[in-house]
């Protein structure tokens, strides 16, 4: 009887070993870059081959596995797995099936690749200075005649699942769990500043007040204006519209500001069109969701810098509503706004 039980145990161990070996043998990890056309690659991964190889060159040392195993996933497949997730927002199991990796491996790829991309933040998301600032002001001036503009600022909600900690803080004014993501863009839809760590219930004005960019403007490091909606306080460096314009110059001021500031809403639309994971719900905790969002912003800038962009026509870009909670204008912001109206729009 004991010998029979030992035989059954040996048999079970042998079968488990055979199943493990069989899985490794039959799994076929294809390289999509070798079988799809350029248009098919762009549709699936939102970038074309030269840009994907550029990303590979930038982050491959950080995601290379130091192992002697012959089944380690190469960096190019890790990047494609992550890009497929960001482009679709699909479940990890579905993303893994498209390349031939497991659900667990897909999750690890998404996290490790996004962590490596986030380390490019200082190189890819920078606020304009010097000659670049002058070029930015000229580009904004050509749009609607608003002078001395360095960027447009706004916030957008990115949905997440209900977190385990401080869950009520993440319920936004629209009633769903989210992060409130603040970004600044230039005239080419390029993101020049991003803050993605705040819960959805936090007001835009607080996110701005607590941001590093706000402190730099307060300290006089930048000479120019940001354009925001009525959810932001009007400051000497942050212009918001007149809530009830009473004169023709004030109406011209508002029209110019609206036509210029819409670029940040278009930027959010372009970002969410390229990376559909930002349109739905990120099924992860807030900390990891923040890293996914920042990684998408960095990849967005890489695509623009390399000319690998989605169609930016306004009629196809989703325009996002502004914050309805208007703030009052105080102090030097009122004086500066009146000065701009008297000088440029009278």
Image (tube, grey):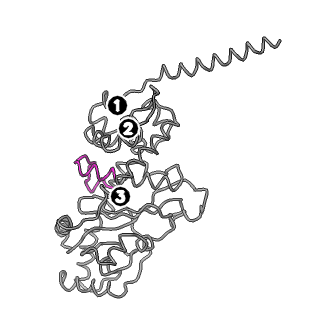
Who's the residue at 51% across and 54% down the image? 160
338 or 138: which is nearer to us? 138
Where are the magenta residues, as a range?
298-318
Q: Is residue 111 part of the magenta span, yes or no?
A: no
**Disc 3 and disc 2: Cα gap in Å?**
23 Å
Q: Is residue 305 part of the magenta span, yes or no?
A: yes
Q: Which element is circle 3 on? A: helix
**Disc 3 and disc 1: Cα gap in Å?**
29 Å
The x, y position of residue 67, in whole percent, is: 45, 32
**Contact, mark 3 vs mark 1 (Cβ under 8 Å):** no
Is 204 left, or right, of 298 in this rendering? right
Q: Which element is circle 2 on? A: helix
Is 331 left, or right, of 10 in this rendering? left
Task: Indicate whether 189 appears above or below 129.
Answer: above
The residue identified by callout 2 is 80
Instruction: Residue lying at the far right in this picture: please name it.
Output: 1
**Disc 1 and disc 2: Cα gap in Å?**
8 Å
Task: Indicate whether 283 appears above or below 109.
Answer: below
- The numbered mark at residue 32 is 1
Who's the residue at 22% across and 82% down the image? 340
- The numbered mark at residue 268 is 3
Task: Indicate whether 91 appears above or below 240.
Answer: above
Which image quadrant for residue 15? top right
Say few, some or many: other residues with alpha carbon within 10 Å of mark 1 (under 14 / 14 to 19 / 20 or more): some
* Quadrant in which the N terminus is drawn: top right
């Amino acid at each position: 009887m004991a010998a029979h039980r030992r035989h059954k145990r040996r048999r079970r161990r042998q079968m488990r070993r055979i199943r493990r070996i069989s899985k490794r043998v039959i799994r076929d990890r294809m390289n999509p870059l070798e079988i799809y056309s350029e248009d098919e690659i762009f549709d699936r991964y939102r970038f074309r081959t030269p840009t994907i190889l550029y990303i590979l060159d930038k982050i491959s040392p950080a995601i290379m596995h130091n192992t002697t195993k012959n089944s380690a996933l190469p960096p190019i497949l890790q990047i494609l797995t992550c890009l497929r997730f960001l482009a679709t927002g699909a479940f990890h199991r579905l993303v893994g099936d498209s390349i031939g990796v497991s659900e667990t491996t897909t999750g690890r790829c998404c996290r490790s690749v996004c962590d490596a991309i986030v380390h490019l933040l200082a190189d890819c998301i920078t606020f304009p200075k010097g000659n670049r600032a002058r070029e930015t002001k000229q580009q904004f001036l050509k749009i609607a005649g608003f002078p001395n503009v360095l960027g447009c600022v706004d916030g957008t909600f990115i949905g997440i699942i209900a977190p385990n900690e401080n869950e009520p803080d993440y319920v936004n004014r629209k009633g769903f769990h989210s992060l409130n993501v603040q970004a600044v863009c230039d005239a080419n839809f390029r993101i020049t500043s991003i803050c993605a760590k705040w819960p959805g219930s936090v007001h835009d004005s607080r996110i701005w007040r607590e941001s590093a960019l706000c402190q730099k403007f307060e300290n006089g490091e930048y000479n120019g204006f940001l354009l925001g909606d009525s959810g932001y306080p009007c400051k000497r460096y942050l212009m918001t519209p007149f809530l009830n314009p009473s004169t023709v110059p004030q109406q011209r001021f508002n029209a110019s500001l609206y036509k210029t500031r819409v670029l940040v809403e278009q930027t959010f639309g372009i970002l969410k069109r390229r990376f559909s994971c930002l349109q739905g719900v990120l099924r992860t905790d807030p900390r990891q969701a923040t890293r996914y969002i920042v990684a998408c912003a960095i990849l967005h800038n890489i695509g623009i810098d390399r000319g690998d962009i989605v169609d930016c026509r306004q009629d196809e870009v989703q325009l996002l509503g502004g914050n309805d909670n208007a703030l009052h204008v105080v102090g030097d912001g009122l004086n500066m706004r009146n000065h701009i109206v008297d000088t440029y729009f009278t």
